[in-house]
Image (cartoon, grey):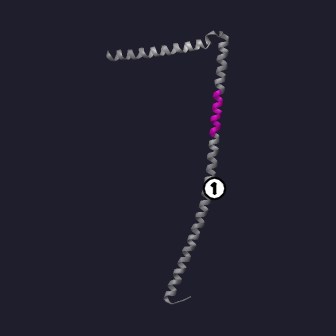
Amino acid sequence: IIQWVSDEKEARGYLQALASKMTEELEGLKSSGYATIPRGEKNQWQMRRSQKMDKQEILQLQANLQAEIQAKQLMGEEMNKIKAANVANERKLGESEAQCETLREEVKQLKAEIEQWRLGGKT
């Protein structure tokens, strides 16, 4: 029973808040002159407002789409730059590895020459 009473109090509070909010909105509409507009003009006004809202929504969606397209283009350009840098780095790495291998062979040859020179077989 206590829970039921508590639920009833919560519901009553919610309904009172809703009623006062609706009253405020109704008074706001009355003060803005909406209630004095003839019936036919109300429908036209609502249609124009609806069309305006639809247009605004379409424009917003188009702007969002354009921004997304630009972001994707920028990402594509950045990706192309990164790919080009990667290709250049791979080329440099290949050249460095080849140079390193050449130097290893040269060191190997020099070691062999030093060993021959030590043994007395000067070249």
State the residue lying farthest toward the left.
Answer: 1
Q: Position of residue 116 (x, y in %)?
A: 51, 86
- Is 76 situated left or right of 12 in this image? right
- Tell me where residue 89 sits by quadrant: bottom right
Range drawn in magenta: 56-68
Q: From the top left corner, tell me how far across and down residue 86 is, in percent.
A: 60, 57
Image quadrant for the C terminus? bottom right
User: Could you tell me which residue is drawn at 35 percent across and 15 percent down?
Assistant: 5
Return the residue at label 1: 84
Q: Residue at x 51, y 80 (%)?
A: 111
Q: Is residue 102 above or below residue 82?
A: below
Q: Quadrant of the N terminus?
A: top left
Q: Is residue 87 above or below residue 12?
A: below
Residue 83 covered by magenta stretch: no
Task: Measuring from the top left, give residue 120's x and y in whole percent.
Answer: 50, 90
Q: How many marks?
A: 1
- Residue visible at 66% across and 18% down in the picture: 47
Q: Residue 42: give x, y in percent of width and height.
A: 65, 13
